[in-house]
């Protein structure tokens, strides 16, 4: 057996062992959840300002933190519950949109310099949720959402690439969008279009 | 050209999962990467010249997404490489040894080794997908192989 054959055999087994079955229906469900996560990213930014400035409702949950926040979802303000679970690195945000309940869940760990892992702090979760969102609407327009800002960037593309500087207080984000081919955000400079997708 | 999601899942899920796992070293994140990649295909209106172009694009999206996840806060809990190797039903010590050796490689060598040995991609194709020079691919392939010389039987050519 050649090295390539051996390598393929090993990683075929890895794939067969861990790969989850995928169905188109489930992917579409996931796409919907994806959209909501992005919506919440724009929304939670505004929510975080409120959290920071007022302290709002704060309650100790069993083994975690539950907080009532207000979200901006594509410019519409709505109430939401942020639950940060203790010990299992996960959080969820629940809110109403178009009359139906929506829940976003996420999670993760932060890696310290010494390699140890720890749960994300609330501030880190909020920071991650602050990221701008890009939306392609059915009418062909392209919109950027950041905090409570809604910007139509449809006419800002040159050779399929658009650069948007977003400012909120003393926080600046540099956004590079490749039309229909992804986007990238940095707090330092515009990401090169070649550096993603 | 475009293909239906059903066709894509059938044709590429295993490849994308293997590429994602190679970077994330974690089943949950790798499955997330595969789903995100198919969702990105579904939401883009991009047209592809041929099958090769489509596969290269899917691999590039999956690899970039896997790197994003690996470097973000959102890494899921994971087993150690040794524990994971124990869980996968490898048939021999050689297979387990190869898996562990690859997983211990630095990421930049791991991704090149994987595209060469698993996907059968050329130096040129690998360079295009990873957006690095062909010289860098050759160098990383050579260094990666040298790390794996104890588990690979063939001589380097």
Image: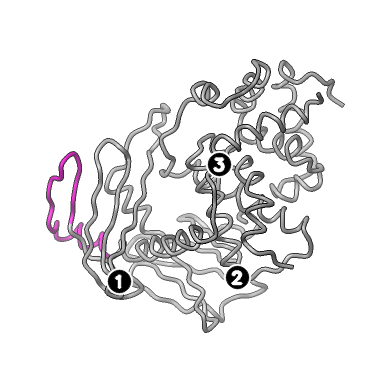
The residue pinned by badge 3 equals A19
Horizontal relation, residue B38 to residue B131: left or right: left
Count of residue discs: 3
The residue pinned by badge 2 equals A179
* Mark before the other along the chain sequence, 1 or 2: 1
Mark 1 surroundings: few (<14), some (14-19) or many (≥20) residues within 10 A = few
Horizontal relation, residue A52 to residue A144: left or right: left
Read off the chain for label 1: A
The residue pinned by badge 1 equals A97
Horizontal relation, residue B42 to residue A82: left or right: right
In terms of depth relative to the viewer, which is nearer, A47 or B74? B74
Where is residue A171 drawn, in percent x and y?
36, 60
**Residue A190 appears in view:** no
Q: Quick one: SS at disc 1?
A: strand
Q: Is residue A138 above or below residue A71?
A: below
* Mark before the other along the chain sequence, 1 or 3: 3
Residue in view at x 50 percent, y 48 percent? B32
């Amino acid at each position: 057996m050649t090295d390539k054959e051996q390598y393929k055999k090993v990683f075929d087994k890895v794939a067969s062992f861990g790969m989850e079955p995928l169905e188109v229906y489930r992917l579409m469900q996931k796409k919907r959840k994806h959209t909501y996560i992005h919506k919440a990213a724009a929304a939670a930014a505004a929510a975080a300002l409120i959290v920071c400035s007022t302290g709002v409702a704060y309650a100790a949950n069993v083994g975690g933190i539950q907080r009532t926040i207000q979200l901006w979802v594509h410019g519409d303000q709505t109430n939401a519950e942020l639950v940060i679970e203790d010990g299992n690195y996960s959080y969820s945000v629940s809110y109403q949109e178009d009359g139906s309940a929506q829940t976003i869940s996420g999670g993760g760990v932060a890696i310290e310099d010494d390699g140890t892992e720890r749960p994300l702090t609330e501030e880190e979760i909020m920071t991650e949720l602050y990221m701008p969102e890009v939306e392609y609407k059915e009418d062909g327009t392209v919109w950027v959402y950041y905090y409570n800002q809604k910007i139509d960037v449809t006419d800002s593309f040159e050779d399929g690439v658009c650069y948007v500087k977003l400012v909120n207080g003393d926080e600046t984000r540099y956004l590079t969008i490749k039309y229909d081919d992804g986007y990238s955000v940095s707090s330092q400079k515009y990401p090169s279009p070649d550096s993603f997708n | 050209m475009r293909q239906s999601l059903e066709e894509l899942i059938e044709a590429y899920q295993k490849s994308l999962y293997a590429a994602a796992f190679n970077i994330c070293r974690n089943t949950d994140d790798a499955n997330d990467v595969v789903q995100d990649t198919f969702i990105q295909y579904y939401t883009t209106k991009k047209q592809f010249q041929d099958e090769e172009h489509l596969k290269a694009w899917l691999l590039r999206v999956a690899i970039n997404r896997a790197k994003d996840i690996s470097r973000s806060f959102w890494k899921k809990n994971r087993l150690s490489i040794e524990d994971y190797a124990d869980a996968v039903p490898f048939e021999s010590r050689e297979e387990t040894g190869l898996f562990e050796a690859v997983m211990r490689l630095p990421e930049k060598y791991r991704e090149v080794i994987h595209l060469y040995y698993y996907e059968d991609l050329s130096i040129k194709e690998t360079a295009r997908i990873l957006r690095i020079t062909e010289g860098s691919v050759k160098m990383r392939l050579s260094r990666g192989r040298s790390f794996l010389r104890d588990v690979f039987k063939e001589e380097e050519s």
